Amino acid sequence: MDTKILLESGTNELEILEFIVGSQHYGINVAKVREILPYKRPTPIPNSHPCIEGIYMPRDVIITVIDLNKSLAVPYETKEDSDMFIVTNFNKLNVAFHVQSVVGIHRVSWADISKPDESINNSGRSVATGFLKINGLLIVILDFEKIVTDISPETGLRMSDIDALGIRQRNNSPILVVEDSPLLIKLIHDSLSKAGYTAITLTNNGQEAYNLLCRYKAEHSVYEKVKCVITDIEMPLMDGHHLTKLIKEDPELKDLPVIIFSSLVNEEMRRKGELLGADAQLSKPEIGSMVQVLDHYISQN
């Protein structure tokens, strides 16, 4: 499978790969997908997490295999002649997800993806980041980062990196954080607070952040209210790339530093971010490095 389906930068579009687990249809951003391979029984690892089937080495890279049926609590009997692996790369990890079948790819807008409400995503426990309706069929977009982090917490934000920064002075420079995951937005907020930043505004997607910036523009108070924007890429309604494009193309906003902080930061996505004018791009485990980059831009203001 060709995973280099990078769309024109900043169009607020994405490619969703539709697949089936049990009888339910799910989706994943193609930007996370390296390849799709036929299922091959992996090598079991003693005393591993129940959702880890084992390891798989199709070429020269060892890949951890996660059974999505177990992870999603969907009963199903493995069919070795028809099941598939979706091999992914995000947060600098190579992980294969065992699914029943792959349906196809849909090109959609982030505006077409509905965000789960609080009744579904109570306390950030849900692994659904959004819902997409295609030809009358509801596709659940899964939070693969949360699935992996729930199995192996050390693969998430490395909070110990903040401790390694040592004792820091309080800093009241206003920071705008744009992140749709309830779990991650709390972790980012807690990390920035621990690093001394006391004026943090949290928004759930690019559209919400951009509306806020437009309000500040109307009040002629942009640079009083925001000194730096930290944004995820994957978000319903408006993604971080489109938000970056809108900021950097606006004469009144273009001097705002934009830090992209996302599990999707790889070589290809980094080039895309550079084209849009992002000031810095870091992968989500690197919370300590992100704070140091933030320090740099705040010190320049």
Image: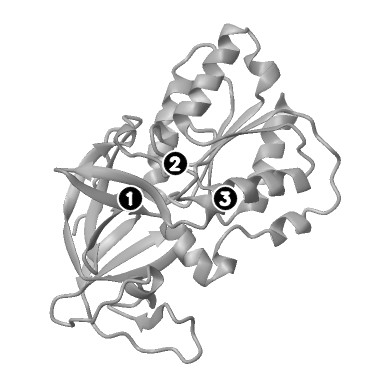
Q: Amino acid at mark 1?
A: Ala
Give the mark, 3 or 2, whose residue is nearer the N terminus: 3
Q: Amino acid at mark 3?
A: Leu
* Nearest to the observer: residue 265 or residue 109: 109
Q: CA distance from mark 1 to mark 2?
A: 11 Å
What residue lies at 57% left-to-right and 20% top-to-bottom?
Answer: 255
CB under 8 Å between callouts 1 and 2?
A: yes
Left or right, 184 with reference to 131:
right
What residue lies at 24% left-to-right and 69% top-to-bottom?
Answer: 22
Q: Which residue is mark 1?
A: 31
Can you give x and y, in whole percent of width and height, for residue 278 in the image? 49, 33
- Quarter of the image for the N terminus: give it: bottom left
Q: Which residue is mark 2?
A: 233
Can you give x and y, in whole percent of width and height, for residue 169 in the image? 86, 40
Q: CA distance from mark 1 to mark 3?
A: 20 Å
Q: Which residue is mark 3?
A: 184
Q: CA distance from mark 3 to mark 2?
A: 13 Å
Left or right, 104 with reference to 47:
left
Give the mark, 1 or 2, whose residue is nearer the N terminus: 1
Q: Amino acid at mark 2?
A: Ile
Q: Residue furthest bottom?
A: 46
Left or right, 78 with reference to 184:
left
CB under 8 Å between callouts 1 and 3?
A: no
Can you give x and y, in whole percent of width and height, for residue 276 in the image? 42, 30
SS state under label 2: loop
From this view, report whether residue 106 is shown above or below residue 150.
above
- Give the crowd class for mark 3: few <14, some 14-19, many >=20 residues within 10 Å: some
